[in-house]
Amino acid sequence: KPVTHVVGQTKIMAIINQKGGVGKSTTAINLSAALGELGKQVLLVDLDPQGNSSSGLGIEKSQVNNCIYDVLLNDVPIEEVIIPDVCEGLDLVPATINLAGAEVELVAEMARENRLKDAVGSLRGKYDYVFIDCPPSLGLLTVNALVAADKLLIPIQCEFYALEGVTKLLDSMKRVKTRLNPTLDIYGVLMTMYDGRTTLSRQVVEEVRAYFGRLVFETQIPRTVKLSEAPSFGQPITLYDPSGKGAQSYMSLAKEVIARG
Ligand code: ADP
């Protein structure tokens, strides 16, 4: 990170879609790393009990003392849980399987919807971007992300039934917007695992663009083997295969995000 870098207004974004396997963690890891490489200060908060964003950035369970669970339920300050510099410009708040219990344990807590907002809000001014990698459900963890976030980034896989469940997500967003987070909105919709050789991929993109219009990013993330291999090496695509299509596409997404402001 350049020493001269001055952090602007922090943008807190939830990477969200209650469907599993649509590219949330892949996007969380690689968009964060790409923005870091472009000189931004980025924090990735892993809010998925699977911990794929954490392991995909090379963080092993044995290296983690406290995780986001302890921030949400044990009043541990988020600063104490941050793992700095997992790659250039990128810090991480890891998740472990402990987080699986949080969904149930939060139910009995006071201000249970605001836990993440309070924690992450204390970091405003320290980062350009805070991304929250959400679990594949619309439970209390996801509600915490909806309350904490300024905007939503929704990855959609170029597959049959791509828009299935999106109405439910938008309903949840509207409910949280009405009661708890009035300025919440969609920041962008990202088409993932795009295969330009198939009519299916092209049709899905058409359908999603018809539904979301200009909210859909110009950048589409292609399906590439390298993107699926990188996590097992604990590296973002920008390090694992810097000149490949996957890295190019996430760099291009990062530039689009910067340009969108
Ligand atoms: P989610 O976080 O929504 O559950 P993941 O990011 O974990 O989704 O992606 C699901 C699976 O698809 C993972 O095995 C991941 O490596 C793979 N994957 C994601 N994006 C791509 C892509 N663009 N090309 C190839 N494989 C991908």
Image: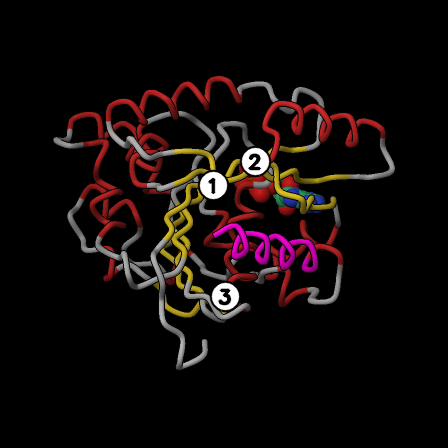
Q: Could you tell me which secondary element the residue under label 3 belongs to?
A: helix
Q: Could you tell me which secondary element the residue under label 1 belongs to?
A: strand
Q: How many marks?
A: 3
- Pick whichever of labels 2 and 3 is earlier in the sequence: 3
Q: Which residue is at a point 50% across and 62% down the rendered structure image?
A: 58
Q: Which residue is mark 2?
A: 215
Residue 14 placement, left or right of 223: left
Q: In the image, ligand 1 is in what quadrant?
A: top right
Q: Is mark 1 within 8 Å of ligand 1?
A: no
- Pick whichever of labels 1 and 3 is earlier in the sequence: 1
Q: Amino acid at mark 3?
A: Gly
Q: Which residue is mark 1?
A: 15
Q: Is residue 249 magenta?
A: yes
Q: Which residue is at a point 64% across and 57% down the rendered structure image?
A: 230
Q: Residues within 10 Å of mark 1 (few under 14, many from 20)?
A: many
Q: Amino acid at mark 2?
A: Leu
Q: Which residue is mark 3?
A: 36
